[in-house]
Image: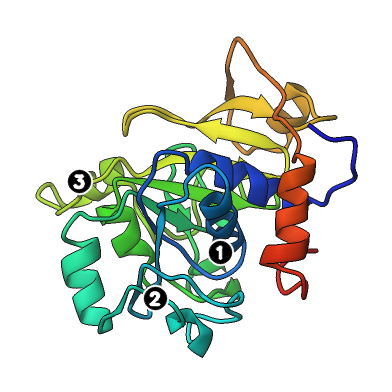
Amino acid sequence: MTDAEYTTTELLSVLSARELAGRRRVFAGIGLPTLAVALAQRTVAPDVGLVYESGVYGAHPQRLPESIGDSFLVSGAESVLSMSALFGFVLQGGHVDVGFLGAAQIDRWGNLNSTVIGEWERPKARLPGSGGAAEVMANSREVFVVMRRHDRRSFVDELDFCTSPGPARARAAVPDAPVRGRGVTTVITGLGLLRRESAEEELRLVAVHPGVDADQVREATGWPLEVAADLPTTNPPTERELRLLREEIDPRRVYLR
């Protein structure tokens, strides 16, 4: 542990990296997932391989990429595939252990919305949409979601739109839906850590960050949130983890805030 000050971005990056212990292949997006995998490679998961939807497999970029099309993604990569090959053989072939996703909304079952806020015909906001998120949800062995904001606008009782359905919702709509994974198992937020073990379970609060209590998280959640009987506090970043993030991984502060 450390008494050093740290930001929410640093905390979420560190906690996400720790979750990758024992994992081998991670399908990640730009931003917090990139920071988390880079830190995991230097700490708990030196052999973890990073996969990007642009076709890069086994990424080891010389510096942090600033977009999914950044040329630095291919520097040091184990291979570069076409997007169709990556999705068809790597992701849909069942070779991804963890998919990292973000969303504007999440419900108690781990279904995600990244398409529209409000009514479809008269939305309050239109969002980027799925990209590869629906395929990542369906084909990764499990999915981690990282969300800085934890409030009733993001953690909702009912999604305004379901972009990435978890296994149970997908099979309810299409009984023979080709869903191989467990869906969302872990959600790391600015308030704490939520988990679910199976498609039939709701997300429940299993840890809170320093200075946060269960009532605060319940108040910020749009459904009656289940809370673990034993509710620990997450361990803050260590001095080594902060040094790696600040001095080696993102010294230019591309993503660190």
Between disc 3 and disc 2, whose residue precedes? 2
Mark 2 closeness class: few <14, some 14–19, many ≥20 residues within 10 Å = some
Residue at 40%, 74% (x, y): give it.
131
User: The N terminus lies in which quarter of the figure?
Assistant: top right
Please state which amino acid type lies under the numbered disc 3. Arg
Q: Amino acid at mark 2?
A: Ala
Crowding near pointer 3: few (<14 within 10 Å), some, many (20+)? some
Q: Residue furthest bottom?
A: 71
Is any atom of residue 175 visible in this view? yes
Identify residue for label 3: 171
Q: Mark 3 or 1, which is nearer the eye?
A: 1
Q: Quadrant of residue 196?
A: top left
Judging by the rendered image, the residue that carries numbered circle 2 is: 77
Classify residue 144 as left or right of residue 125: left
Residue 65 vertical placement versus 168 (above, below): below
- In the rendered image, residue 110, in percent from the top left (x then y), is placed at 44, 43
**Which one is in front, 38 or 26?**
38
In-front residue for pair 106/140? 140
- Residue 54 versus residue 191 in the image, above or below: below
